Amino acid sequence: MDETATRAQLAQFGHSLFARGFSVGSAGNISVRLADGYLMTPTNSSLGRLDPARLSKLDEDFRHIGGDPPSKEVFMHRATYRGRAAAGAPVGAVVHLHSTMATAVSCLPDVAPGNPIPPLTPYFVMRVGRSMPVVPYYRPGDAAMEPAIEAAARGARAMLLANHGPVVSGKTLTDAVYAAEELEEAAKLFLLLRGTTPRLLTAAQVEDLLATFS
């Protein structure tokens, strides 16, 4: 898509996520790669009321070159793009939300730090992958978390920021949004099943899904 269409798509996805409660107030931010840089949601903006013409534009080095000033968490997106590229899996978009269920999982002290949500459904594996690390807590907006996010992104498409929320990447903006939505549903299932012994997908089933749909 050209930049005009990408701007419109980003605003539409933002409105949809906000309307369904995946973000509240000015929480969350989204970015998408362009041929000559990136578009990003502006600082202190609501995903439900994005103006396509006022989206932040960044150059290839993530310097602000147009539109409103970008989210204070621009470093989070930069780290994710760089981490995925270093892993040989470059992505085209990053979605950071404060969605309720995924954020709830990020607050649990007794989950596996390398894979807090087990493989309950095939679509979770297909869209999120086999692992999803939990990045230790940092104050929101603290650029000191950038190396930790980049390191996590080298091995995973998605991560949870402890006591904060999910960061999800995808080949396209559509892929990233769908993965963020699937993560929220998987987190809901995981919380509903806490204290039980659910049937998980086997290692062979997970590998089959990744080989078939990667």
Image (tube, grey):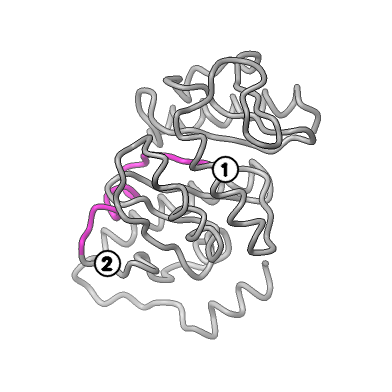
In magenta, the rendered stretch is 95-109
Tell which tag, 1 or 2, sits nearer the viewer: 1
What residue lies at 68% left-to-right and 45% top-to-bottom? 92
The answer to which image quadrant residue 187 occupies is bottom left
The residue carrying mark 2 is 111
Answer left or right for 107 relative to 213: left
Q: Position of residue 91 (x, y in %)?
A: 66, 50
The answer to which image quadrant residue 109 occupies is bottom left
The answer to whether 102 is drawn above or below residue 40 in the figure is below
What residue lies at 29% left-to-right and 50% top-to-bottom? 137
Q: Position of residue 53 (x, y in %)?
A: 65, 14
- Check disc 1 and give the amino acid type: Arg
The answer to whether 24 is drawn above or below residue 93 in the figure is above
12 vs 2, nearest the viewer: 2
Which structural element holds mark 1? helix
Which structural element holds mark 2? loop
**Label 2 neighbour load within 10 Å: few <14, some 14-19, many 20+:** some
Q: Position of residue 108 (x, y in %)?
A: 22, 58
What residue lies at 54% left-to-right and 66% top-to-bottom? 155
The residue carrying mark 1 is 78
Q: CA distance from mark 1 to mark 2?
A: 27 Å
